[in-house]
Amino acid sequence: MSVFLELFGEEMRRARQAAGLSQEDLAAKISYSAAQVSAVERAARRPSGDLADRVDTVLGLDGRMSRLLGAIRHEGARPELRPWLIIEAEATAIRSFQLSVIPGLLQTEAYARVALTAGGVLPPAQVEEQATLRIERQAVLFRDEPPQAVFVIDEQVLRRPVGGPEVMREQLLHLARLSDGYPHIHIHVVPLSAGAYVGMDGPLAVATSPQGEVTCYLDGQLAGTLVESPTDVGAVLRRWEAVRGQALPIGQSRQLIGDVAEQWT
């Protein structure tokens, strides 16, 4: 059983009892059933973001349950990735470059599952856990005050057959919808005609915190690296700008994504 799931249930129970409420009382106030409240407190049910928000509001917990829920979501991630996920979830701006795969924040569930299954490296249970985590991370793009999010991907990502034509077409149409329907989400494509460029060295991500602090993350085959020192952050930002400079404008990128999507039939 998840340690964080048990902690969430215990903290919810303590806060409820401190407020002098029974499980039935709290259930009525948050518009959930008493059975659901009981299951969460016993760590027999994973709480939803909506439930955590409502408990925080009703019991005046100043976001405590929502923060604990974030810990639950991150528990299944690789240890070195967990700090980045917390930074990402609170960021006011996110910049991401991917050379060989659709960025996790933009993946459809079908694409994510195929990508995680590839090569049989992960056991089925871990694939399920990682796919769920990847989709849940995407909530950061649709919160009340979402970050300005800029994604750059290499054109080869659009053409690599991950899961076959149906999965790829759904994925690329999803990218087009995000680019067209959400002004804070910018998706750019580096065309194959760009030739050699600095992005060939690998993926990178940059996040800006509400306090203006910039942190970077470099992903690798076995582990990722969190980059926080000013000197190294500056070096990553220069690489980001070089990569971004090779990408097509939003409109041309959207057109290319749509054209390739139609080829996946």
Image (tube, rainbow, N blue to C red):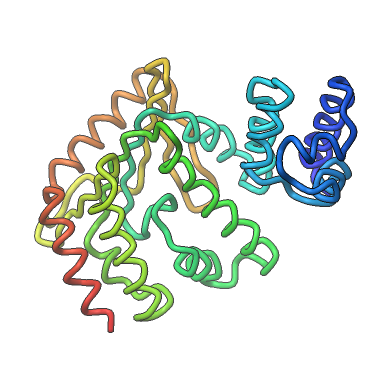
Q: Is residue 111 left or right of residue 168?
A: right
Residue in front for this viewpoint, 170 or 204: 170
Residue 104 in picture, x, y percent from top left: 44, 53
Q: Please, is residue 126 above or below residue 46 in the view?
A: below
Where on the picture, by quarter, is residue 42?
top right
Where on the picture, by quarter, is residue 53?
top right
Q: Is residue 170 left or right of residue 194?
A: right
Residue for point 13% across, 41% down: 245
Residue with the most extreme bottom position? 265
Give the mark count: 0
Q: Is residue 72 left or right of residue 87?
A: right
Residue for point 16% across, 71% down: 259
Residue for point 14% across, 59% down: 191
Q: Please, is residue 235 above or below residue 46 in the view?
A: above
Residue for point 82% across, 43% down: 37
Residue 184 in picture, x, y percent from top left: 28, 39
Residue 62 in picture, x, y percent from top left: 65, 20
Q: Please, is residue 95 above or below residue 137 in the view?
A: above
Residue in front for this viewpoint, 81 or 24: 24
Q: Which quadrant: the C terminus?
A: bottom left
Q: Is residue 139 left or right of residue 154?
A: right
Residue with the most extreme top position? 211
Residue 216 in picture, x, y percent from top left: 40, 32
